Image: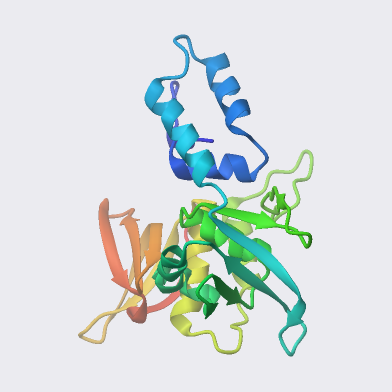
Amino acid sequence: MADVESRALASTFRVSAASIGRAIAAGETAASIREFLASISLTGVPQPLDYLITDATERYGRVRVRDLASHSEPDGRMRTAVVSADPALLTTIAVDQALSSLGLTKVAPDRLESRFGRDVVFWALSDARYPVAAEDAAGEVVSLRRHRVARVTAGRSVDPAIDLIARLRSAEVVEEGTTQEQWLARQIDLAIRAKQTVFVSVAMPDGRTVEYLLEPTGVGGGRLRGRDRAADIERTLPLSSVQGLRPGDG
């Protein structure tokens, strides 16, 4: 229900509409969120925060994601529908460059479709801060949890760099119809979620190839944004100039 802003002896957290939406998607309710916050606060739940919880709860589910059990791609992959009673909101989602890799197609004013699975589409919309809810085959809202990429073994630590390499390799096969920029966007998204640094090879106008060690912070609109760990500055790079990625030193 909150995003970590800084980690220290006294860590700081930020509650937002997006973080409240994630909490509700994971099974929380407005009542349970208020109860938890009240239990850790010495002065009760501030009124602005109470309003935020109410607003985020009311907006939750304006967009619904469901499996299309009766439709599939020729190779058998299930399709997913994104529906909403707000056509303007669906239009915004359809043209959102951050969601271009989902291949969303508008088939009706209140419906988009994607060839990716429900969970993939749901978490992409959730990460893009849309008020999304997942539905089961009966049309009932269900709570989803992200699948673990690596199994945690007792007594054995997992190197974040090795974990990221495994995920990058698992996604090396570019699906038919997917552009190089979309493929790069997916790899960058993996690095963002893993909070991992990456070496980015960029083709310069003069023909040189320059490699930056970046901590990616966002990808969208055909551009990669991240903090240059060596120069300690923010950089924005066009995906069309990115030649490749490889994990950094963590």
Look at the image and tell me whether residue 12 can be seen.
Answer: no
Front one among 157 and 182: 182
Based on the displayed image, in which of its 4 quarters is residue 30 positioned?
Answer: top right
Residue 239's place in the image compared with 162, above or below, is below
Where the N terminus falls, by quadrant? top right
Total tally of numbered discs in the picture: 0
**Residue under the point 57% across and 56% down:** 161
Q: How far across and how far down the image is residue 23, in percent?
A: 59, 39
Based on the displayed image, in which of its 4 quarters is residue 244 positioned?
Answer: bottom left
Q: Is residue 118 left or right of residue 214?
A: right
**Residue under the point 66% across and 71% down:** 80
Q: Is residue 245 left or right of residue 171?
A: left
Q: How far across and how far down the image is residue 83, in percent?
A: 58, 66
Q: How far across and how far down the image is residue 124, in percent?
A: 54, 61
Look at the image and tell me whether residue 138 can be seen.
Answer: yes
**Residue under the point 54% across and 62% down:** 84
Residue 42's place in the image compared with 99, above or below, is above
Q: How far across and how far down the image is residue 143, in percent?
A: 70, 47
Residue 27's place in the image compared with 162, above or below, is above
Front one among 227 and 53: 53
| Residue positioned most to the top | 42
| Residue positioned most to the left | 206
Front one among 48 and 171: 48
